Amino acid sequence: MSWKKNLLRPSITNRILPVEIWGHTLVVVPKGDASGFSETEFAHEKLLLEKLVQDPQLQHIVVDLKNSQYFGNDVTAVILDLVEQCRAAGKSCGLCNVSDAMQIPLRDLQNNPACRWYGSRRQAEQDLVRLTASERVQRLFRRRDFRLFLMLVFVCLIGWWITTLRTRQSELLDHCDRLEKILRQHRSMRDLGNLDDDWEQTLASFRLEIESILKDIENDKSEAANEIRAACVENLLPLLGSPWQGVAEQVRWDRAADEHLKTARRMLDAVPEDEVEK
């Protein structure tokens, strides 16, 4: 029924007798006295409520009186009629948040087996409401404290992600520094012609350091890591593994490695691109 679907948004429709539908339970939350509204509007909402009570899919009715300490005669009459309609239809009905001032107007309901009294809406819902999984999620998201909790979790996740990203960026920049240092030392020793035993030991230590860097970025699929990986595998390791290779070939490997590292720095936003080009 279209009217039932519309009442799932009570703030748009009913103003005097707002309703909520959870599972097979109708929850009525009267706003107070009907004197502030037109008779036509009140009659329309009352008729709409009677139709809902007759819906065979709604087996339980909860009337939550939290909005006022005292309700006028018109609203009180609606509550009494509602309980009687539930009794006639064989449905269960519950009242909650009944103030001391409403004890006397509703005293006839205290001994009515068709109507149960509860101290709070939560107690009434636990006893009467049977929610589907989707409705439980919907109700959870309507809670302000839960939405605030989700926002807090989201902010924490964003903070963690940014921290992790910056930490990884710092680590990759450190790898660039170490590899550029290896390149500088290799050039210096090569230019001085120090190709003795110390040279072999230095090359071995360079290779171990490069292998350590490759192991660290093994599962890193970022573009910057790919550039560092290319500098190591395609250029630095061949350069360090062939100390007797011709000068032209060594210079080619050296320049290619240097270009890969500069590209990695640009991707990591470590320095402006014009400074890298220098």
Image: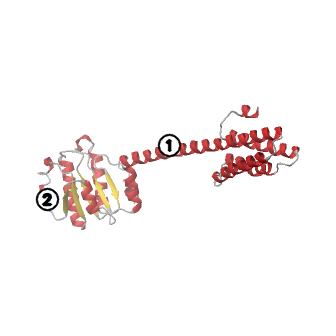
Q: Amino acid at mark 2?
A: Gln
Q: Earlier in the sequence, mark 2 or mark 1?
A: 2
The quadrant in which residue 23 appears is: bottom left
- Give the class, few, some or many, for how many residues have Cα within 10 Å of label 2's Cα (few <14, many ≥20): some
Q: Say if residue 199 shows up in the picture.
A: yes
Q: Secondary structure at mark 2?
A: loop
Q: Residue sitting at 27 percent across and 55 percent down?
A: 122
253 to the left or right of 103: right
Q: Is residue 58 above or below residue 120?
A: below
Q: Could you say where residue 214 lies in the image, as x and y percent from the top left?
A: 68, 52
Q: Amino acid at mark 1?
A: Gly
Residue denoted by label 1: 159
Give the CA separation, mark 2 to mark 1.
55 Å
Q: Residue sitting at 75 percent across and 52 percent down?
A: 233
State the residue lying farthest toward the front: 197
- Asked if marks 2 and 1 touch (Cβ < 8 Å), the reply is no
Q: Is residue 206 above or below residue 270?
A: below
Residue denoted by label 2: 110
Q: Quadrant of the C terminus?
A: top right
98 to the left or right of 222: left
Front residue of 154 and 94: 154
The quadrant in which residue 151 appears is: top left
Q: Could you say where residue 251 lies in the image, as x and y percent from the top left?
A: 84, 42
Q: Say if residue 51 shows up in the picture.
A: no
Q: Could you say where residue 52 lies in the image, as x and y percent from the top left?
A: 31, 59
Q: How many numbered callouts?
A: 2
Q: Secondary structure at mark 1?
A: helix
Q: Residue sitting at 22 percent across and 59 percent down?
A: 94
